[in-house]
Amino acid sequence: MTHIQESLNKGKLAVLLPCYNEGLSIRKVVEDFRRVLPDATVYVFDNRSSDNTSDEARTAGAVVRAEQWPGKGNVVRRMFSDIEADVYIMADGDGTYDSSVAPQMIQRLIDEHLDMVVGTRRDVYENAHRFGHGFGNRLFNGMYSGLFGPLFSDIFSGYRVFSRRFVKSFPAVSSGFEIETEMSVHASQLRMPIAEIPTAYGARQEGSVSKLRTVRDAIRIMFTFLILFKEIRPARFFGVLASGLTVLALVLALPLLVTYVETGLVPRLPTAVLSMGLVLMAGIFTVSGLILDSVARGRLEQKRMWYMTNSAKQG
């Protein structure tokens, strides 16, 4: 820890723990982080818990704050807005992450001038997930690599260390568990320097219930993928739609064209009209994609400038 403080030049460390009904585990989580990071301030953001999460966190020595808007994304947005620090450590309050790895993650962030270090979960499928969760992790990590790039091997890990410039440039639009996906996309879009460190991932405290819902959250994450892909790469998104419509129009129009060449007649006029309509829609999608691509480029430049502004402050 002394080396970390020397590297930070007495900068501030903040441990951020978003919580919802984690009364069974939060005291140990806070105590563990205070033990391995004695100079850090531990913040617990209680997201409308109905149990004794806040009392347990205060007893363990955490600074407790409340966020009334439900959902992890809303809690992260509040934490990133309110807390001022030089390095941020975020973990869950359920005790599944290994706090002893935090100093190593922080030191790597500092030494390599990174913006995010992700604690990838070792044996995540064997230790703490139902089959549906394990399959979903593999599926969505593969989709992420195809859509946004291969930088991340565990986009759903909630154990992360951030620089100040990441936290203060992150828009945090998502409201739920899809917030980790948005963090990863933000880093990929701005081409931030990131790293991953394997960490142990254990089972939840006995009696504690997971807040994840396999089908519901899978649908929300899929929808988030589509929205972020549209926002970041609109030309490609609308280009795929335009290509699909064009192919469908050709499939419908080809028999009509053959009949017209042979007989000079168009026997199925509604099909011909439908084919023309599909071609027109494909053209509209193509133009929309090109226009929105220019808009997205302008937004990216603004994000990059804001990121650079916070880099100057951090320096």
Image (cartoon, grey):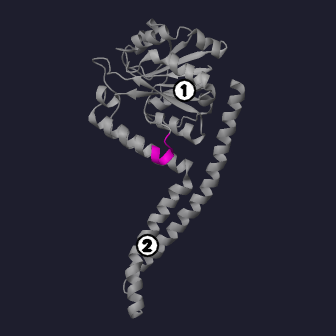
The percent coordinates of residue 222 (x first, y second) are: 41, 45
Q: Which residues are magenta?
A: 145-150
Which amino acid lies under the numbered mark 1 shown in the image of this protein?
Arg
- Residues at badges 1 and 2 in contact (C-beta under 8 Å)? no
* Residue lying at 55% horizontally and 12% vertically, measured from the top left: 41
Question: Magenta span has 158?
Answer: no
Amino acid on which disc 2 is placed = Ala
Where, quadrant-wise, is the N terminus in this rendering?
top right
The quadrant holding residue 262 is: bottom left
Residue 132, percent from left and from top: 29, 37
Count residues near mark 2 (Cα–Cα under 10 Å), then give few for <14, some for 14-19, many for 20+. Answer: many
Mark found first going from the N terminus, 1 or 2: 1
* Residue 111 image point, x, y percent: 61, 22
Q: Is 139 positioned to the left or the right of 290 in the image?
A: left
Q: Quadrant of residue 284?
A: bottom right
The residue pinned by badge 1 equals 78
Compared with 95, 272 (above or below) is: below
Along the viewing direction, whichever of 108 and 135 lies nearer the viewer: 108
Q: Nearer the viewer, mark 1 or mark 2?
A: 2
Q: Is residue 217 above or below residue 88?
A: below
At numbered mark 1, what does the secondary structure look like: helix, strand or loop? helix
Dominant secondary structure of the residues highlighted in magenta in the image: helix
Check the image and report above or below for 44 versus 179: above
The residue shown at (44%, 78%) is: 273
* Residue 80, horizontal then vertical, whole percent: 57, 26
Q: Which residue is mark 2?
A: 249
Please say if 241 is above or below 116.
below
